[in-house]
Amino acid sequence: MEEKLKRIKHPNLKNRVVTPEEAATWINDGMTLGLSGFTRAGDAKAVPFALIKRAETETFKVNIYTGASLGSDIDKAFAEAGIVGKRLPFQADPTMRGKINDGEMLFVDQHLSHTAEFIRAGVIGPIDFAILEAVSISEDGLIIPTTSVGNSSIFAEHAKHIIVEINMAQPEMLEGLHDIYDTGQQGERKPIPLMNPDDRIGTSGIKIDPAKIKGIVFTNQMDSPSTIVSPDAETKQMADHLLEFLRSEIRVGRLTDKLAPLQSGIGSVANAVLHGMVDSEFTDLDVYSEVLQDSVFDLIDAGKVKSASCCSITLSEDKMNKVFGNFEKYRDKLIMRPQEISNHPEIIRRLGLISINTALEFDIYGNVNSTHVSGTKMMNGIGGSGDFARNARLAIFVTKSTAKGGNISSIVPFVSHVDHTEHDVDIVVTEQGYADLRGLAPRERVLVIIENCAHPTYRAQLLEYYAEALTRGGQTPHVLEKAFSWHTNLKQNGTMLHEVGQLVY
Ligand code: COA
């Protein structure tokens, strides 16, 4: 215990230590909890599990707000226990996804920079308990987060009570990485003074009123590793196409070999595409992203990165061991911010980010669906992709041209759900090639998208749809009654593929 108490440096807080089980008894039916955690990193672990245990003998529901997805199978356990009324702003767990799609729990799929504004303005909440993982509590009462900041600072500011989980498995050398800045109320705020991706503008921990800390528990558990899969031949091709595009921007003088600050979204595809830069000529790169995945550390190892700003670090097991086993090598390059700041429109536009996110599908005019399988079933959520795409210098979306063994074309006549409108999408990339949509009218985009990005198996079908759409006319020609026929064909026949001229409508 002596060793543990050293992590509570504030003199008046050492007597607040309780067990996770005791802390969990403070939580009542109908309460709203703000949990630390962003894409499996820095999540509160012990109190959520103690609460889930309570559900074995009690019936209750709570609303769960987080930064993004939780690790340690907490979202899975929450979903199985059936104790979540409403969940926001992001999740990525198959069991929880199933419960959401079955209508057994509610999910608000929110731009990740918006949650803090909603809490600050009292649109959502109030938050009864903020439950935050920390490395330590400083002498002056700052909560020092672990591997993510996410929404922790806004939760702490607005929660009625705070429970801190000090995780002894997280090294104290994480202290100094964080940069916590509060924008203040809308209408009264000043410009955010962040001019360069590696500027520090805030404090090294989360300022709180120590009186709000109702309890402190100790844990000793590393984050769950990420579930991304390694780059494959197709993602390598996508990376090559993206590099080719970036080189063409350099040739015409819009970029230099330092590019512009890079943002790369979650998932295997975005990770693999960024990984493709390891062997490129690009140098001195700044990363201004939401999550840092393995590829950013590969780029640091390759000597390509000047700075890397994020709101969470989410790594595969192997990479986690390498990075945290050799942290001094990376430390000076890393800055971790609240997600409101990592994803802030003002900063994204000011820095002129190159933003790379993943689509499930996009259509012949450039609308992108990143969230809803066949228009209705939630996958993960929009995450930060909308924050970045709307405001970036270059909004790039990547996806393989087909899914599920070729039965699904990722390029469809009309996306079955729109997350990113044609107005927000600059470049689309598949393993087939890339389409630069900037400055193109809808009728110009169609052919570039089909020729450069669609899988050859589906090109004739897409052209046939467009030919019929043209007979109807319009700025954005469509055959509305057939616009989702590919999705209905998939549902009925297990494939989007049909013989040209014999479309199954
Ligand atoms: N229809 C149905 N399923 C599709 C599909 C489509 N058009 N395209 C892909 N899929 C399936 C894949 O087959 C795969 O299924 P599996 O898990 O059963 O193997 C799954 O979707 C994931 O696709 P994958 O190609 O492996 O990509 P990924 O791991 O990179 O994830 C997203 C892609 C879109 C799900 C993910 O990037 C995401 O949730 N994005 C939205 C949030 C976001 O962009 N956040 C970043 C902001 S910083």
Image (tube, helix red, strand yellow):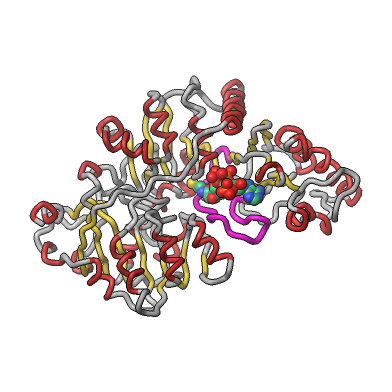
* Residue located at (67% from left, 37% from top): 438
- Foreground: 17 or 417? 17
Label count reads: 0
The location of residue 354, given as percent across then percent down, is: 52, 36
Horizontal side of 204 relative to 436 (left or right) equals: left
Q: Which span is picked out in magenta?
A: 370-395
Residue in the image at 21% along x and 62% along y: 217
Residue 56, percent from left and from top: 36, 74
Question: Horizontal placement of 441 versus 331: left or right?
Answer: right
Q: Is residue 498 above or below residue 19?
A: above
Image coords of residue 44 (percent x, y): 31, 58
Of 483 and 2, the residue lying toward us = 2
User: Going 53% across and 71% down the picture, which residue do you hit?
Assistant: 104
Left or right, 419 with reference to 306:
right
* Residue 374 is covered by the magenta coloring: yes
Locate the N terminus by quadrant: bottom left
Q: Is residue 477 visible?
A: yes
Magenta-drawn stretch contains 375:
yes
255 over 55 or under it: above or below:
above
User: What percent of the width, then of the height, locates residue 459?
Assistant: 79, 38
Q: Which of the 4 quarters of the picture holds residue 10?
A: bottom left
